Image (cartoon, rainbow, N blue to C red):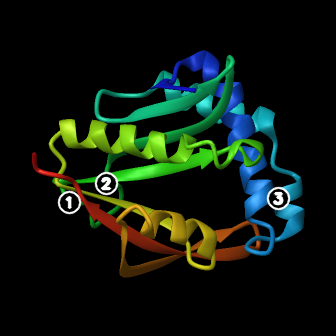
Amino acid sequence: MIIRPAQQQDAPGIAKVHVETWQSHYRGHMPDDFLDVLSVDDRAAFWTNSLAKSSEDCRTYVAEEDGKIIGFCSVGPMRGDDAIEEVGELYAIYAHPEDQGKGAGKDLMKTGLHFLKEKGYKKTILWVLKGNTKTRDFYESRGWMCDGIEKVIPRNGFAFEEIRYSIELPTE
């Protein structure tokens, strides 16, 4: 497995990981009819556009094994009205359900946080579904701390609750 910066041609592979992970891991957190209509093609268009517009401040990395994208992460400056200049954000991190347990998530996180540290960020945040205890346990086992900030995101006739985690980046 290699971790490398994503390229535009990786968009379909990233989209497949993104959609199939949502469909697998978000059942019970989101309505099935919402998850069932998620489209890899639509998500690939999103990722193609996103990767084309990427800046020096944001980076998407992929985990690749035998020429296949098995995971990805995306990082950059903290977003939102309350954004703080010294704080980065882990926007997304996913490993395909069939490839979990291979260390892709851990390696992607390490690479993404290293990028943010090199950009001068002192701290990083991420948002996770409040009820997703498996993912929350993954973050907590890697030093992330729930800081108690929550938000509700309306989506197509339903809403989901997210809670924020943060981690201090090493100074050395």
User: What's the CA distance linking mark 3 and mark 2?
Assistant: 27 Å
**Apparent side of residue 2 relative to residue 90 in the rendered image (left or right):** right
The residue beneath circle 1 is 84
Q: Quadrant of the N terminus?
A: top right
Please, what is the three-letter code of the amino acid marked with disc 1? Ile
The residue beneath circle 2 is 78
Q: Earlier in the sequence, mark 3 or mark 1?
A: 3
Please, what is the three-letter code of the amino acid marked with disc 2? Met
Residue 78 x %, y %: 31, 54
Q: Earlier in the sequence, mark 1 or mark 2?
A: 2
Please, what is the three-letter code of the amino acid marked with disc 3? Leu
Q: Nearer the viewer, residue 84 or 74?
A: 74
Label placed on residue 161: none
Q: Is residue 69 above or below residue 35?
A: above
The residue beneath circle 3 is 35
Residue 141 x %, y %: 44, 66
Of all residues, the one furthest to the front in this rendering is 102
